[in-house]
Image (cartoon, helix red, strand yellow):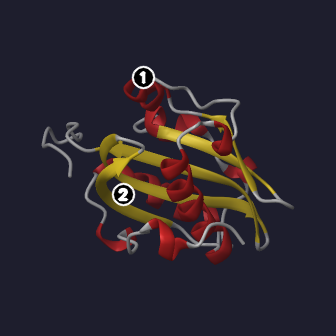
Amino acid sequence: MGVDSAMTGIPDSCIDTLQDQRLIRLLAYWQQKCLGRLMPSPADIEPLEFKFILGYVTLVDIETAPRRYFFRLDGSILASLSGMDYTGKYLDQLGLPEYCDFVAATYDRVIDGRRPYAYRKRGAFDKASFSEETIILPLGKGEQVQRLMVAVIPGGRPGNDGKMLI
């Protein structure tokens, strides 16, 4: 098990009320790739099939015993907006303890539940404020989650309909 979600303020899932059309499309893509299984395998995912959101997607590998999160790829738009590219780093190496605890708790929720999770959150971690709508999608074989596909749409950014998000 990972971080205690009660201590990190994990919001209830908003998977059924996503606002950003790109996140809704990505969820539909993930569901289509499930092919009747609990989740698609990492090999089932083809990034060129979701170009509409690719720069906002991060791929996270999961290590077990102890559980640890490795950023296989950080979306180029996310890296540009945050000023940090997480690619090739572990979550616990980022030097942002409040943020890392929160993120680990959301990842743990998806891994332990073996189902997608989404949230909208405004707040501050480690003296930096943020606003975002996020979806976390599990990838794996059988009931074993091997990778997470995470899409983050920062608040205050225009959606594909020109409206401001969150």
Q: Nearer the viewer, residue 165 or 68?
A: 68
Count residues near mark 1 (Cα–Cα under 10 Å), then give few for <14, some for 14-19, many for 20+: few
Image-based side of 44 in relation to 55, left or right: right
Q: Check the image and report above or below for 148 versus 12.
A: above
Looking at the image, the residue that sits furthest to the right is 65
Image-based side of 166 in relation to 26, left or right: left
Residue at x 65% of width, y 73% of height: 114
Count residues near mark 2 (Cα–Cα under 10 Å), then give few for <14, some for 14-19, many for 20+: some
Amino acid type of the residue that numbered disc 2 sits on in the rendered structure = Ile
Q: Where, by quadrant of the figure, is residue 92 drawn?
A: top right
Say which mark, if any, is on residue 90.
none
Q: Nearer the viewer, residue 81 or 163?
A: 81
Q: Secondary structure at mark 2?
A: helix
Q: Secondary structure at mark 1?
A: helix
Q: Where is residue 150 shown, x and y percent of the image?
A: 53, 49
Q: Which residue is mark 1?
A: 80
Image-based side of 45 in relation to 55, left or right: right
Q: Is residue 133 visible?
A: yes
Of the numbered discs 1 and 2, the one sitting upstream in the chain is 2
Q: Quadrant of the N terminus?
A: bottom right
Q: Nearer the viewer, residue 119 or 24?
A: 119
Q: Where is residue 162 shown, x and y percent of the image?
A: 14, 38
Residue at x 51% of width, y 32% of height: 75
Residue at x 47% of width, y 66% of height: 8
Q: Where, by quadrant of the figure, is residue 85 drawn?
A: top right
Q: Where, by quadrant of the figure, is residue 52 drawn?
A: top left
Say which mark, if any, is on residue 24.
2
Nearer the observer, disc 1 or disc 2? 1
Q: Nearer the viewer, residue 166 or 53?
A: 166
Q: Where is residue 66 shown, x and y percent of the image?
A: 83, 59
Looking at the image, the residue that sits furthest to the left is 163
Alpha carbon distance from label 1 to label 2: 23 Å
